[in-house]
Amino acid sequence: MSSSDANNNNKIAKIFIDYNNNGTFTDDNELVATSGNLANAAAFTGNIAVPNTVSIGNYLRMRIVLQETSNAADVNACGTYAKGETQDYRLLVINPSNDVSVTSITNTGSLE
């Protein structure tokens, strides 16, 4: 995720996932990531650990909130703000894969 607007103002992003599908993002484990201060086209990347209580095949709602502020406490899953953006996404939980593949084979000489 990146902030790509034309100003240099600080912004903070938070990512929420409604793991129990109760329509809110206020349960203890549903805030899954918080950025530091983002300015200009700064990027925010990270990993999200999904709890093992989540069922394969379920759809979950993820919300990303980017707000113009330098205080992370100002950014909430629901509410109003003067400048920022909120986006919701639908996630499908799939079974993790442990497939192994070969990306290249190099001939290092003949084997006897």
Image (cartoon, helix red, strand yellow):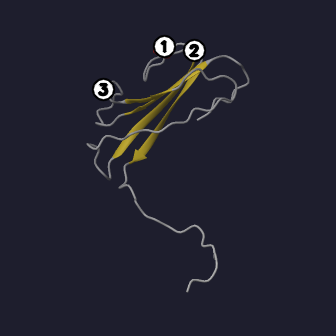
Query: Which three-letter amino acid code belongs to the residue tagged 1?
Result: Asp
Query: Is label 2 in contact with label 1 (beta carbons under 8 Å)?
Result: yes
Give the residue furthest to the bottom: 112
Structural distance between the alpha carbons of marks 3 and 2: 24 Å
* Numbered label attached to residue 27: 3
Task: Tell me the quarter of the picture where residue 2 sits.
Answer: top right
Q: Earlier in the sequence, mark 3 or mark 1?
A: 3
Q: Residue at x 43, y 43 (%)?
A: 90
Give the residue furthest to the right: 6
According to the picture, the residue beneath numbered tag 2 turns out to be 69
Measured as percent of width and height from the top left, residue 19 is found at 32, 37
Q: Earlier in the sequence, mark 3 or mark 2?
A: 3
Task: Tell me the quarter of the picture where residue 45 sits.
Answer: top right
* Numbered label attached to residue 30: none
| Total marks in image | 3
Q: Residue at x 66, y 22 (%)?
A: 39
Q: Earlier in the sequence, mark 2 or mark 1?
A: 2
Structural distance between the alpha carbons of marks 3 and 1: 18 Å
Query: Is label 3 in contact with label 1 (beta carbons under 8 Å)?
Result: no
Query: Which three-letter amino acid code belongs to the residue tagged 3?
Result: Asp
Measured as percent of width and height from the top left, residue 76 is found at 44, 19
Indicate the secondary structure of the residue bearing disc 1.
Answer: helix
According to the picture, the residue beneath numbered tag 1 turns out to be 74
Structural distance between the alpha carbons of marks 2 and 1: 7 Å
Task: Tell me the quarter of the picture where residue 62 sits.
Answer: top left
Q: Residue at x 69, y 26 (%)?
A: 5
Measured as percent of width and height from the top left, residue 72 is found at 49, 16
Q: Is residue 60 above or below residue 105?
A: above
Indicate the secondary structure of the residue bearing disc 2.
Answer: loop
